[in-house]
Image (cartoon, rainbow, N blue to C red):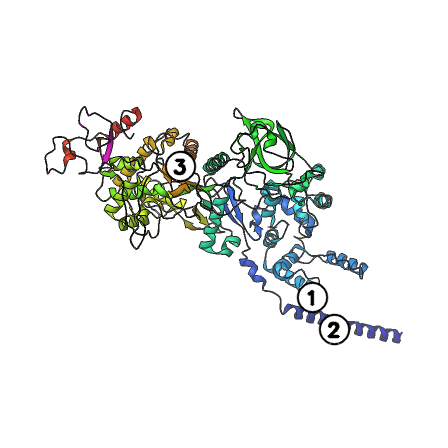
Amino acid sequence: MKFALRLLGLLFAVGTILFLVGLAAAAGLIWHFSQDLPDYSQLQNYEPPVMTRVHASDGSLLAEYARERRLYLPIQAVPKLVINCFLAAEDKNFYEHGGLDYSGMMRAAILYAQNYGSNRRPQGASTITQQVAKNFFFTSEVSFSRKIKEALLSMRIERAYSKDKILELYLNEIYLGFGAYGIAAASLVYFDKPVNELTIAEAAYLAALPKMPGALHPVRNHDRAIERRNYVIDRLLENGWIKQADAEKARKEPLVIANRSNGAHTFAGEYFAEEVRRDIFERYGEKKLYEGGLSVRTTLDPKLQVMARKTMVAGFVNYDEQQGYRGALSTLDVSGDWGVKLADIKSLQDISPWRMAVVLDVSDQSARIGFQPGRELGGAVARQRETGIVTLDGVRWAKAVSGPLHGKTPTAVSQVLQPGDVIYADPLFKDGRPVDGQYRLRQLPEVSGAMVVMDPWTGRVLAMVGGFSFDQSQFNRATQAYRQPGSTFKPIVYSSALDNGYTPSSIEVDSPIEIDQGQGGAVWRPDDFSVGHYRGPITLREALKWSVNTVTVRVAQDIGMPLIAEYAKRFGIYDELPNYLSYSLGAGETTVLRMVTAYSMIANGGRRVKATLIDRIQDRYGHTIFRHDARECRGCDATEGWHNQAEPQLVDRREQVLDPMTAYQITSMMEGVVQGGTATVMRDVGKPIAGKTGTTNEAKDLWFVGFSADLVIGLYVGYDKPRSLGRTAQAAHTAAPIARDFMKLALADKPAIPFKIPAGIRLIRVDAKTGLRAGPGASGRTIVEAFKPGTAPPDDDAIEGVTDVDARAPAVSPDADRALVRSGTGGLY
């Protein structure tokens, strides 16, 4: 008995010693691994990389920029359904344990022992807290040391932060595939909807993804994805978080993915979005752009943008088709599965409704074409094979550019198309309606160009077209292409003159002129499109109306090129303009955006504007860090409510770059260009329009820049590698019609607003040819001209030496002037 007791005591002592040694060893192990644990306090100020989102002026999403597609969502904004799905899939006891799930760890240990030596990856038993520790502080290395550190750090995190905070960090940090980090971004990427609109099945699928997003690919591994999604649904039911009927309905729901685009989300807004991206990059740097979570409200008007792209592309295509058909893009063998072969050819994705197709067979009357199939989310070519018919009506424009049929209208489809030809086609329209199953041959235009639409009062860019296709070329011709503006620069020359002693009725001579360029240079003889035709003495108004080069050069000689260079710099057209007279005819190079900005300053009465594509930028916390409108609003910060105080006042300190009366005079003269000069096609708009065409040397660029009371448009058409657009090409026939088509759409529902006449302007009836005051019963054509005080021509009985002759002959009132314009009996042509 004593021996048994002594043995029992010995065993107890040994056990105690072993326990103390084990405890000491465990404590030592914990101490050892605790020495280099990461500083978890940084979680308190965690700022994850968040995508920058760019919106149009109406709030619609334009683009997103990110390395990790993430939108940070506070836990209070996460629906209970979504939370339950992730708890069911990852850690149903999350709100009960202290960071470690011991029962789960035991199960994982047993499985590890059973699978030891099988090269199978051990099953994890990580809680959500452990996953937060791993995602933020550790790698995915599979080792006991990492798991121990992870467990120790998890317990510290649990003591430092609330469960909701830990869950918030987890739901915003986890990677869920397709570049999406966090549930908010994943909901948009997979289903194109916010998390609060997710169905049970959709939320369950997202909850299934954290451990193996690649293995649960919705297309490549569709069945496995459905199986894992349904597993999560079963756990929701098992935990009592959904009802049986809801679970059965969710299991039957198909897994349909939206495949949301990474690029510009507003059709036709790609060039605009890329320009905004470059702007943000230059302002704040790469890290802020792709990780800063900026919210950018741009100036883009989506409706105007679509109109601008539609009319600009139509202009490119119309010009290009007049030059003839250059042939198929390429050819391929149409035997076998032509769809797979066609799918491998890169097609432009931003020129809808154009679609790439291959000619399958041809007759004289038609050709059967097969359209390029799309690719599924996994990259596989879609099984569907869609076909259509190109009829003779669809190829009549396609005159051959060479060979025996050069320049002749096709009489058979087989003259144009052959089996295997890879082409573009879009629906054939008759009487304004698409003909079912019939298509029209298209070709990518060689000619290009750009268009900018601006609000003249603020400089806000409302629309921008940088070329035919962003997918084809990301070079933005509206901001990056420096081209000669030609005669669209003349209003700047005339504005300089009007600001320095000239009037619209000043007389200059249209006759041959020779300029000695010095230093061995050839004699320069500027001439017009109609070479050898001269008008003799004409007014400045008439000279601008018909874009007379000799008069412009003489005016430039008189006032001096340094003065014109100063005005060009004021308007922002050129930074430095050489003192050569040829530059008065637009021989320098500038951009469409600069020209439109300059014309905006004329349209708004001479006030400086700075072009902008961005209205406001906010940081991730909603604080405004940039605002384009720099005007001071006095009284806008009142918070006490309305107590009969004075209305808030906007203080505009922008520089006056042009006399308001000069701005109206040149506007009135450009109205004359539209009403009876080189831009008469713009009269079809049916609203007051002022503008100027420009055709450069050898017709390498065709321009139009003009405006209504509240909208400025500028565009050019030309080849990227400048060459002549044709011996007879003119801006009046190519560029101006594009502007007309746009303005007709943009101003369709707008009232006809006349240009504002500034105080002090005198409207006097004058002879259109001589510029002299027209007396009662004057013969010949008369107009109502705008004069600054003291500059109007004298009447017939004026006393020599009297300068203030305006007081002796009352001016025609603005209302009378507008009535004359509307009646067609006088006014501005």
Report the span colored magenta.
Answer: 768-788
Q: What is the number of the mark on residue 759?
A: none
Please report whichever mark, 1 or 3, sits nearer to the chain's N-terminal start. 1
- The percent coordinates of residue 153 (x first, y second) are 64, 62
Q: Residue at x 69, y 71 (%)?
A: 28
Q: What is the number of the mark on residue 730?
A: 3
Q: Nearer the viewer, residue 258 or 589?
A: 589
Q: Main secondary structure of the magenta part?
A: loop
> Which secondary structure lies at badge 3?
loop
> Which secondary structure lies at badge 1?
helix
The question of residue 771 being in magenta is answered with yes
Q: Which residue is mark 1?
A: 145
> Position of 32 compared to 681: left or right?
right
Type of the residue with mark 2: Val
- The percent coordinates of residue 447 (x first, y second) are 48, 41
Alpha-carbon span between mark 2 and mark 3:
97 Å
> Position of 586 compared to 269: left or right?
left
